[in-house]
Image (cartoon, rainbow, N blue to C red):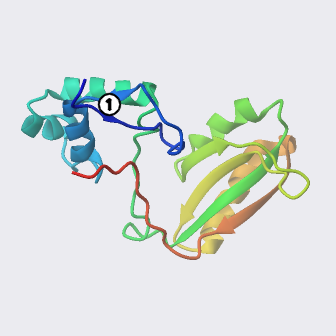
Amino acid sequence: MSEATRVAPAGDAAAPVLDPVLDPVDRRLVLATQAGLPLVPRPYDAVGEPLGLSGAEVRARLTRLLENGVIRRIGVVPNHYAIGWTANGMSVWDVDDARVAELGPLIGSLDFVTHCYRRPRRPPLWPYNLFAMVHGASRDEVRAKVARIQALLGDACRGHDVLFSTRILKKAGLRLVE
């Protein structure tokens, strides 16, 4: 444990944390994955091989790091522009609180929604509690997809808006210094 690196849970960098602790293998695993997983059929095996770990051990260690809050999530971050999606809009919805848990997964399962999540409202300026990122080749295409979401939400939706991206922001997760 003396060689371990102490880390704060994602999103709480100011808080000192006594546990969880990165052991030397976990630290090497985070370093090996912080730039992303390789685009191969068995990415966990590919990451684990130079570390002397099986793919199953890589998955188990990453799962433990997720459960302990050391890492917040593992996800796909596509380059939308490279695949032809040049219009990207975060659709925001004012959905009846009694129905948002039912309707959120329905919206999130749509093939044109890359992520969907519930967030607290911030009245009086921000009445929205459901967010769904929609992509398309044009703003008109995004608006047409948003209309499909509106039809699915029906009368549970009291209002919505679409916030279009105006620039590309660098996306980065946990970074350790080697």
Side of 8 where 6 appears, left or right: left
Q: Residue at x 21, y 51 (%)?
A: 178
Secondary element type, mark 1: helix
Residue 25, position as x, y percentages in the image: 19, 31
Dot 1, crowdedness within 10 Å: few (<14), some or many (≥20)? Answer: many
Task: Please tell me which residue lies in front, 11 or 129.
Answer: 11
Residue 20, position as x, y percentages in the image: 40, 26
Q: Which quadrant, please, contains the N terminus?
A: top left
Residue, disc 1: 62
Q: Residue at x 71, y 43 (%)?
A: 119
State the count of labels.
Answer: 1
Side of 108 where 72 appears, left or right: left
Q: Amino acid at mark 1?
A: Leu
User: Relative to residue 172, is residue 97 depicted above or below?
Assistant: above
Residue 155, position as x, y percentages in the image: 87, 43
Task: Please tell me which residue lies in front, 96 or 136.
Answer: 96
Side of 140 where 63 appears, left or right: left
Residue 129: quadrant of the picture: top right
Residue 106: quadrant of the picture: top right
